[in-house]
Image (cartoon, rainbow, N blue to C red):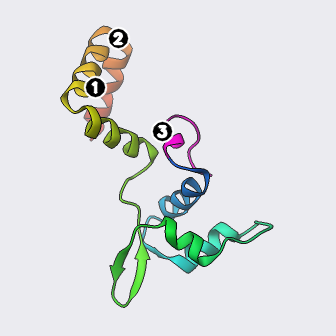
Amino acid sequence: MAEQGGAGSMLGPLEAEVMAVLWRAGAPLPVREVAAELNAGRDAALAYTTVMTILARSRSGRRFVYAPVAADTAEIAVRGVLAEFGDAALARFVERAELDPRLRERLRRLMEQR
């Protein structure tokens, strides 16, 4: 299942399902494989062309295969905030981390893991 709430709300329900299939696969997939995965267990199958319009195109050899350009919905949200607010968003994040010792510690641990 796709991520729900928070940043997941940046994607429509069908977009979230498509992205969940791609994220689980961990490798580019052709439309037919994405559609087959989405249609497994569905009463009304999605059309191949419906799935195709949701995917961003990436060419591999003579076939079109599709891969996510973001790791998850959190990355989509972060990119959107940074694109819209830039340094101001970073400054607010730093302010929050300075005021909240638990957040600062979580941030420190995450940075050490990278």
Answer with mark 3 or mark 1, whichever residue precedes in sequence. Answer: 3
Q: Would you name the residue on which mark 3 appears?
A: 7
Q: CA distance from mark 3 to mark 2?
A: 22 Å
Front-most of residues 9 and 101: 9
Q: Is residue 86 left or right of residue 60?
A: left
- For label 3, the crowd category at 10 Å Cα-Cα, with few meaning under 14, some 14 to 19 and many 20 or more, is some
Q: CA distance from mark 1 to mark 2?
A: 12 Å
Q: CA distance from mark 3 to mark 1?
A: 22 Å
Answer with mark 1 or mark 2, whichever residue precedes in sequence. Answer: 2
Rendering coords of residue 22 (x, y %): 49, 63
Q: Amino acid at mark 2?
A: Asp
Read off the magenta span: 1-10
At 37% from the left and 44% from the top, the residue drawn is: 75
Q: Would you name the residue on which mark 1 appears?
A: 108
**Which quadrant of the rendered structure holds the C terminus?**
top left
Q: Would you name the residue on which mark 2 appears?
A: 100
- Look at the image and say whether residue 5 sits in the magenta stretch: yes
